[in-house]
Image: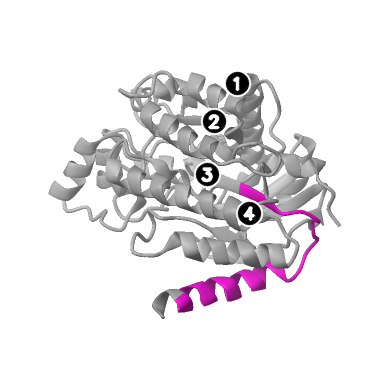
Amino acid sequence: MKETLINLKSYLDATKINVSGKTVNRKLVILESDDWGAIRTPSKEIVNYFEKSKIDVSKSIYKNDALESQTDLELLFDVLHKHKGSDGQPAIMTANAIMANPDFKKIKESDFQNYFWEPFYTTFQHYPEHQNNLSLWKKGMELGVFQPQFHGREHVNIHRWMSALKGNSERVRELFDFGTTFSGIADYSFMESFDWNSPEEVETHKKILAEGLAVFETTFGFASKSFIAPCYTLDSKLNSFLASQGIEWMQGTRSQLQPTGTFNRYTLIRHSFGQENNGLRYNVRNCFFEPSMLPSKNWVDSCLAQIQTAFLFSKPAVICSHRINYIGFINHKNRDRGLHDLNALLKAIVTKWPDVRFITTDQLSEISIQ
């Protein structure tokens, strides 16, 4: 009875998202996954430190989320490659990638007065099981299971984080020394990269976006056609700039969070699938698969109910599933659960809808949308 009610709620919630917007004439599944390449918690030892320092991460993403390891990637690719759509192509992940991370060494050498960043593939070299990650990303691309798209230069609100460091915030400085941007208080204190305290910061955000997109194209040999703002937070003044940089599709949920200048307070801007704005089109996430966020939930059944609703309204089933669900570098049980459920979900999709196709967000530009 409880599962029936959960699935009914999933169905009704998805209906609200899918009732408006443009349509497609085929069953498409798009698996969008954020945060690839971004740092979070560097090691198991730091999780132990959190506990000793009475930093409660029991319900925090910092309990499990870390830079993906070689094993994490290989096991994920194995699961994706097992399941084929009606065109014979495997399930593929739109891997929304962060192009850089803070250069902690240089920031400290500047006595916290200046910000420096390093490319994400340089960060891989600092970790014990990650040196071959970039080659693995490219192997995943060749296998047709892993398609990078642009998620930002870094997943850090530089202005707010550096202000805390310059202000000698004891806890932020303490955790800085462990190689993390965690505030020790709230998960999202410094994660909304394009939030602002003053609207003048939008000009700085343009530079950050341009630099990140340049790293993306240099690294992969092609330009990203889509973008997802960290934490869904973005000033709409950036839309025309993103379009000028080659972005065609904006990923996101039904509600874009428009900054107001006050932390954690936003104006909601509603979007629907295929909506056009300043040269951009919106791809709205209408299915959610986040086993790490609420381990007690039956994510497979709830996501299937949402996929069914998407297809009922002739929308692509756009599944939101963050990297954290597939990371076992800190806690292998977290990865094992995520991959087990992903395997069950993909198996159920191809069984229930044998005419389904798996595509990536950037491939929407090749699809007929009415």
Q: Mark 2 — residue?
A: 99
Look at the image and tell me in which quarter the N terminus lies: bottom left
What stretch of residues is rendered in magenta? Answer: 4-30
- Tag 4 or tag 3, which sits nearer the N-term? 3
Please tell me whether mark 3 or mark 2 is closer to you in this view: 3
Pick whichever, 351 or 102, lies toward us: 351
Badge 3, how many Cα within 10 Å: few under 14, some, many 20+? Answer: many
Labels 2 and 4 touching (C-beta < 8 A): no
Mark 2 element type = loop
Q: Position of residue 28 (x, y in %)?
A: 70, 51
Labels 1 and 2 touching (C-beta < 8 A): yes
Residue at the spot x=35%, y=23% of the render? 105
Pick whichever, 27 or 132, lies toward us: 27
Q: Position of residue 129 (x, y in %)?
A: 33, 24
Pick whichever, 236 or 350, lies toward us: 350
On the rendered structure, is 207 left or right of 314?
A: left
Measured in 3D between alpha carbons, the distance from the residue under mark 1 to the one under mark 2, in whole angstroms, is 9 Å
Q: Amino acid at mark 1?
A: Thr
Please determine whether, in this image, residue 119 is positioned above or below residue 236: above
On the rendered structure, is 99 left or right of 308?
A: left
Q: Is residue 204 visible?
A: yes
Measured in 3D between alpha carbons, the distance from the residue under mark 1 to the one under mark 3, in whole angstroms, is 18 Å
Q: Amino acid at mark 3?
A: Asp
Numbered tag placed on residue 219 in the rendering: 1
Q: Position of residue 365 (x, y in %)?
A: 79, 42
Residue at the spot x=70%, y=55% of the render? 316
Measured in 3D between alpha carbons, the distance from the residue under mark 1 to the one under mark 4, in whole angstroms, is 26 Å
Mark 1 element type = helix
Mark 3 element type = strand
Residue at the spot x=40%, y=78% of the render? 2
- Tag 3 or tag 1, which sits nearer the N-term? 3
